[in-house]
Every structure is written in C-alpha cells, then in structure tokens.
Image (cartoon, helix red, strand yellow):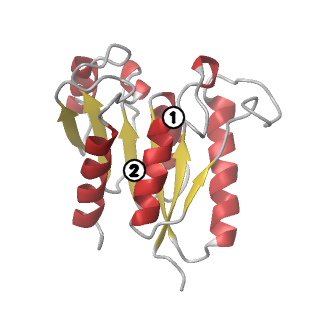
Amino acid sequence: MTPQHFAVLCHLHPLHGGTMTNKIIHILARTFNEYGVPTVRFNYRGVGESAGTYDHGVGETEDVLAVINWARERWTNTKLVLAGVSFGGGVALRAALRTEVARLIMVAPSAAREAPPARLPTCPWLIVQGDADDVIPAGMVIEWVSHLRPQPELRILPGVGHYFHGRLNELRDVVREWLARHEQD
C-alpha cells in the first residue's frame, strides 16, 4: 500500500555536531513512522560519509532538494512532509519555497535570525520552540512569527531548551497531535 505522505528531515548545524542521528531528528523520524509516514534522514554535504563541505545553507538546501527528488521517485503520488531542526529549519523553509510541500514542521528554527522571506509556504506549518532555548531564544522566534502572513501555528513549550533534553516526548506529542489535526489537509 502506498503511503499518503513521506517525510524528509533536515538536521541541526553541521559545524556544531548536527547529523541525521541527532536525538531530535531520531524522535521526529520515529513519530512519523509510528504515524505511517515513511521518513528519510540524511546527512548534509561534508557530514559523516557525505562528500563536500559546508555551504552556509545554500548547498544544504540543494542537498535536501536532491533527497526530496529521490524520495518522490520512490513514493510516487505521495505528498511531502518537510521537517527541520534549528539550522535544518531554515534549510527546510528555503526548500519548501522551491518545491511542493504538504506540511512543514520547524523545531527551534534558526531562520528566526533572518528577515522573514517575502514569500511563504501555503501548506499547514508548525513551529515548536522551547521557552528556555539559549541558542534560538523564544522571544526571537515569537517576534519572527508575528511578521509572517499567513502565520504558522506556534507551540511554545515551557522549560524546554534547544536540545529538548529530557523533553523529547513532549515534542513527539505536539507533532503527533498536529499531524492528526491536519491529516486531511
């Protein structure tokens, strides 16, 4: 049976230890799989066994677009759920503006450090942010989201830091609930 959706996950900053095996990426992959959504995790250029070098988000966006194209060949007529964590949130957003996306999820998005893009995805969009994040402050994300039209759904998790230490189950629950609400979108 062909799934209705497939997911591609974009990991944290490659120069700060981000890989496809990060615990946040792992919990997102597990959550999607439990929901019946096959998931692709991959390393950006220069991470692990991947060839190339860090490219300031530009090449990494090309990497995710290549992975999406590969996955679309594997799961034809299946909709894309794109998710990214921190640096990967910005990569996912840039990729979402260049390809068709059914759902977008950003966790602690570093994109909040940038000006809001002129054009935004029109799909259902979730941002999950901890209010105790010392890398991407919650206030910065709240301010960034306030300028987005249409606005994504923003979920602030009290007491949660950037790496969701001891709080991954809360992230899983938020994503599960959101996926269930947007199942027919």
Residue 170 position by quadrant? top left
From the viewer's perspective, is residue 182 above or below residue 126?
Answer: below
Residue 49 or residue 90, whichever sits in front? 49
Identify the mark at residue 88; answer none if there is no mark.
1
x and y, in percent, of residue 19 in the image: 61, 33
Question: In this image, 94 relative to 112: left or right?
Answer: right
26 up-or-down from 75: above or below: above
Label annotation for residue 184:
none
On the rendered image, what quadrant is the N terminus found in? bottom right
Asked whether, in this view, residue 181 is left or right of residue 99, the answer is left
Dot 2: few (<14), some (14–19), or many (≥20) neighbours within 10 Å? many
In the rendered structure, which amino acid carries the disc numbered 1? Gly
Question: What is the CA distance from the residue labelled 1 to the residue labelled 2?
Answer: 12 Å
In the image, 138 versus 66, the foreground residue is 138
Say which element carries label 1.
helix
Identify which residue, 162 or 166, lies in the foreground: 166
Q: In x, y percent, where is residue 62?
A: 67, 41
**Could you say where residue 123 lies in the image, as x and y percent from the top left?**
35, 57
Q: Nearer the viewer, residue 111 or 119?
A: 111
Q: Is residue 17 left or right of residue 154?
A: right
Element assignment for label 2: strand
Q: Residue furthest left?
A: 158
What residue appears at the point 32 percent right and 31 percent down from the top-left corner?
Answer: 166
Give the residue at mark 2: 104
